[in-house]
Amino acid sequence: MHKKNNNSSRWATVFVLAFAVFLAGCSQAELGAHIAKQIIPPSKTTGTYKIGNPYKVAGKTYYPREDFDLVETGIASWYGAKFHGRPTANGETFNMYELTAAHRTLQLPSLVRVTNLENGRSLVVRVNDRGPYKRGRVIDLSMRSAELLGFKGQGTTKIRLQVLKKESMALADAAKRGIDTGGVEIAMNRHKNSSSALDPQPPGLREDDKTLPRSYQQASFQNGDEKDEKKGTQAVPLGAMEDTFDTSARSAARGLTDVLGDIDETLVSHVAVPAKSRIFVQAGAFTVKDNAMRLAQELGGDVYPTDINGRLFYRVRLGPFAQVGQADTALASLVSKGNQSALIVVD
């Protein structure tokens, strides 16, 4: 078994950052309980804030960018022992027992709420790595996150992902200043009130109006299972309270055997989800209906009109599919025929 070390200065910064995050719209979380038995000692190096340049994996190019408004639906996978103890994309050490995740394009670190659409289990995780790179996946969760969300045994599940905007902005500001952000996700889950409900409204169009949200867009980024090898935005400042709170935080950290407590079932939120969600392979989204009809006829798919922020789009989809594996097969077929922008979506 692995335990946390008692580096009070590290946990003090967790207290400070958690406090700053809560100022963005939450109250201070209750921290404490018992030593987390499964957690390895924290990384000796503090992760940096990272967006990164475009990069290519297996012939596919990905374009990282800041996005504090991202909402995605799709298929999640998880990764574990193969990468345990190895560096993450932003310089931390991957710990499969912590509540972290990999995303191909989000700024690192970010706080996102992931909701399992099959059982309503919901969890805030901290994105600190790149991946997954198998087509048809939107996020790769740590093993412990997958356990708590209830899909470790089946390998994949239908999820909804939503970036926690204010909290992620505060996190970005702290990381840019060299503050270790590890552990804040645990405090967020203990709080239970950080955007735990599903947003019933579909995400809006990008400001440049050139692409649809990733759940709908034709030229979307693709995703994967077990991880493969490998606008500036005004942030919420930590503020003048940092020094004052830092003193009490350091004192509290020194006085506690355990700061953040066990990563257990008490961290999971339960939210309302649709009674039934369906898996589709989306071949494209068009503003011209005739273009959508032609592609649908060619592929043997259907056209699904949808109004997004007052603008009508025609989405060409195959399905619905009962199993993720069936959608994977259909997606692979489309890609092999040259449709590199096809993706799996969940409605």
Image: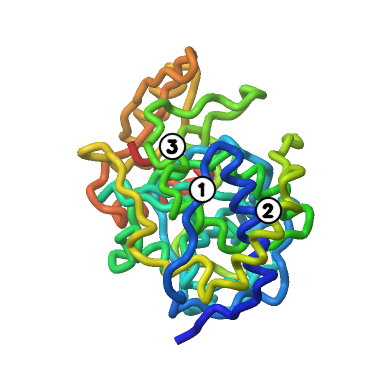
Q: Which mark is residue 283?
A: 3
Residue identifier under label 2: 245
Residue 8 position by quadrant: bottom right
Which residue is nearer to you in this view: 301 or 106? 106
Q: Where is residue 273 drawn, in percent x and y?
A: 28, 39
- The outermost residue toward the bottom is 1
Q: Is residue 63 visible?
A: no
User: In the rendered structure, which amino acid carries the disc numbered 2?
Assistant: Phe
User: In terms of secondary structure, where does tag 2 sit?
Assistant: helix
Structural distance between the alpha carbons of marks 3 and 1? 27 Å
Residue identifier under label 1: 112
User: In terms of secondary structure, where does tag 1 sit?
Assistant: strand
Q: Where is residue 30 drawn, in percent x and y?
A: 47, 55
Structural distance between the alpha carbons of marks 3 and 2? 51 Å
User: In terms of secondary structure, where does tag 3 sit?
Assistant: strand
- In which quadrant will I find the C terminus? top left
Q: Where is residue 194 drawn, in percent x and y?
A: 47, 43
Q: Earlier in the sequence, mark 1 or mark 2?
A: 1
Task: From the viewer's perspective, tell me whether residue 78 is left or right of residue 4.
Answer: left
